[in-house]
Amino acid sequence: MELIIDRVSKRFQTKLALQDVSLRCSPGMIGLVGPNGAGKTTLMRIIATLLQPTTGTITWDGLDTQKHGGSLRQVLGYLPQDFGVYPEFSGRKFLRYLAEMKGLPTALARRRVDELLELVNLTQVADQRLTTYSGGMKQRIGIAQALINDPELLIVDEPTAGLDPEERVRFRTLLASLTASRIILLSTHIVGDVEAVASRLVVLRQGRILADTTPQGLLARANGKVWEATVDLATAQRLQIENRVSTMISKPDGVHLRLVSESRPHAAARPAEPNLEEALLAISTQIPVA
């Protein structure tokens, strides 16, 4: 299976949301990262055939999805950023309803729903109304509905936004368990989500790709660009204005900073090992290459 995105652009009236985005995706987890407004959701919706690109093409196993969208939708699972549920339904009834909408035979649908409820650890509350579910439980029902047809392509858009740390870890672990024999596109602005599960990172900014690399590759690009220093408050405030600061903590001996800068930002600054969030900061000021 292969998903090919070839020079896709999308314009909304005067705003260019995506510009010449090209990707070749094979089975595995691909993290699509970038700030809000980078174009991640627009790209996900185009791949899911919910939007048409202004220019460019997307092919799934050699078929143009604009002409053969049905072939992709048959093997697609999609958890959008704003996932709605039917409040009067229980979790089990909701999944059975969606299985019927996707055309699964009744016996297969019931078996598949039971399997998915166990997979997302909701069997004990399967017959409770969805209005009683926590945010994390609703997200797990969301991933269950996206998996109802055992998709070859799974798209999840900002799946952990609003979840508490424990639920985020549980959700990431669940996603990581699904990577065999399918392509998973995970779109998020939360660096920790992709750092934990994705072997490939695609960084978007202003609708264009800044980097298509691995977490290790992104960290390597930030070597020599991250610094730490302990300074007085006035100096810390000045450095915060002049540089990208990833950490700023006041302690008895002064303000402890971690900064991203192409050169030593202060005489007291020492080189530091970058983390992935700082590596993203390090490339965020780059202008995308045409």
Image: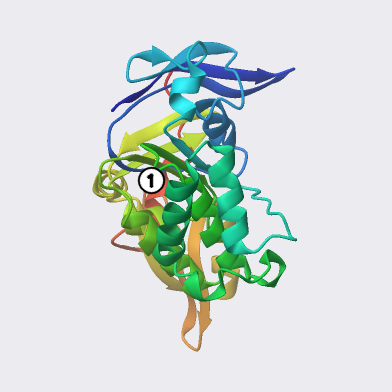
Q: Which element type, helix, strand or loop, lies under badge 1?
A: loop
**Residue labelled with disc 1:** 262
Residue 19 place in picture, x, y as percent:
53, 20
Residue 184 image-quadrant placement: top left
| Left or right side of 91 for 180 | left
Q: Residue furthest front?
A: 107
Q: Residue at x 34, y 50 (%)?
A: 225
Q: Residue at x 61, y 48 (%)?
A: 97
For the image shown, how many numbered marks are present on the structure? 1
In which quadrant of the rendered image does the C terminus lie? top left
Nearer the observer, 117 or 11: 117
Q: Residue furthest bottom?
A: 252
| Left or right side of 217 for 258 | right
Q: Residue at x 56, y 67 (%)?
A: 136
Residue 210 visible? The answer is yes
Nearer the observer, 182 or 104: 104
Q: Amino acid at mark 1?
A: Glu
| Left or right side of 183 for 32 | right
Q: Residue at x 73, y 18 (%)?
A: 14
Residue 1 place in picture, x, y as percent:
28, 28
Residue 22 image-quadrant placement: top left
Q: Residues within 10 Å of mark 1 (few under 14, many from 20)?
A: some
Q: What is the image's colouring?
A: rainbow
Residue 162 visible? The answer is no
In the displayed structure, 132 sits above or below 210; it is below
In the displayed structure, 275 sits above or below 10; it is below
Residue 83 place in picture, x, y as percent:
64, 50
Residue 155 place in picture, x, y as percent:
47, 41
Residue 118 image-quadrant placement: bottom left
Nearer the observer, 137 or 124: 124
